Image: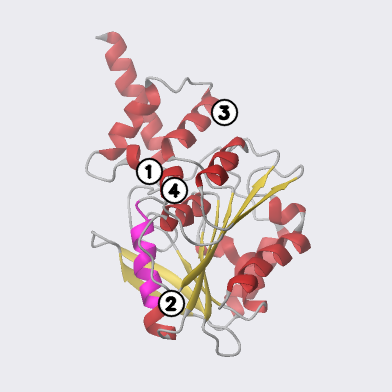
Amino acid sequence: MVIVAAMAGASLYFYNYAFVPSRKTFLSNKTEPAVAQAQNWLHRINKQTWRETAAGSNLQLVADWVPATQATAKTIVVAHGYMNTKEDMARQIEFFHEAGFNVLAPDDRGHGQSQGNYIGYGYADRLDYLKWINRVIRRVGPNSQIGFYGVSMGGATVMYLSGEKLPKQVVAIVEDCGYTSIMDELAAQGRELFSLPRYPLIPAVALTASVGRYNVFAASTIAALNHNSRPIFFIHGAKDTFVPTSMVHREYAADHSEKKLWIVPKAGHAQSLKMQPQRYQARVVGWFNAHWR
């Protein structure tokens, strides 16, 4: 009984640590100067606030719509990372805007201005993004061309999306350092932060998270990528330990569409843009430009 009680207590603690929105001690709360500069730009730029109801829920979600300076049918939907917000994507929003694209930047459930008391890790959020995509099509028109871009949890989000039945307007995807599954990422963080074994704790945490929320056990980007038909560009830092670099090789192998892989030397988690800003921007924008119809 003591062991069972200890396991229950540990799984509840780790569930709150991983799934309940709050300040996380293992995440830096410092804003890099380049991001702060881009955020100042984002505050000044012409944009609109969009609102949407979460899929299968009455949660209210919020997104920034940043229209291109000159009217275009090309739109990038950007997905932010774990405990980040749309404003943390300011550098990417700015360079996509400079490239002449519209940009839609949502806050995921439980993040930023959006409602929610648990973190969806991109899997619960993927169905919300389908609603955002349809919103873009209604706004821009049936001739819309849409690209997905995500970093970290956002990278997983766009990979989860790739396995859904997508509108024909979706043309290409870029994912940066997304994980293979929620279970794998929980195990990686349990090992990295607490030196915990995967079994039996992680399945117990996943079971706790799944009750009345969403099926954590089914949340596999590998399974989603098996169904992907859109061109996808995988990016990952060579020194990533938060989402181990080994994960991207499994993701790349699982995908059967047109694809490209870039392992960025010496880059840690979500640091590829910081390490090689000019090359990163050129390659990401170039991927979308190569696939617009």
Residue at the limit of the structure toward the bottom, as seen here: 70
> Which residues are drawn in magenta?
124-135
Distance between the Cα atoms at labels 4 and 3?
A: 28 Å
Q: Mark 4 points at which residue?
A: 226
Residue at x 48% of width, y 45% of height: 23
Distance between the Cα atoms at labels 4 and 2?
A: 35 Å
Q: How crowded is mark 2: few (under 14 residues within 10 Å), some or many (20 or more)?
A: few
Quadrant of the snapshot with the C terminus: bottom right
Q: Residues within 10 Å of mark 1 (few under 14, many from 20)?
A: many
Q: Which amino acid does label 1 sit on?
A: Ala
Q: Looking at the picture, does residue 61 appear above or below residue 243?
A: below
Q: Of the residues under marks 1 and 4, which one precedes in the sequence?
A: 1
Q: Of the residues under marks 4 and 3, which one precedes in the sequence?
A: 3
Q: Residue 49 carries which label?
A: 2
Image coordinates of residue 143 in percent, x first then y, are 45, 84
Q: How crowded is mark 4: few (under 14 residues within 10 Å), some or many (20 or more)?
A: some
Q: Is the magenta stretch mostly helix, strand or loop?
A: helix
Image coordinates of residue 77 in percent, x first then y, are 50, 68
Q: Residue 192 carries which label?
A: 3
Q: Residue 219 carries which label?
A: 1
Kindly indicate whether the residue at mark 3 contacts the one at mark 2 (C-beta within 8 angstroms): no
Q: Of the residues under marks 1 and 2, which one precedes in the sequence?
A: 2
Residue at x 34% of width, y 59% of height: 127
Residue at x 29% of width, y 42% of height: 215
**Disc 1 on helix, strand or loop?**
loop
Task: Work out whether residue 12 can be spotted.
Answer: no
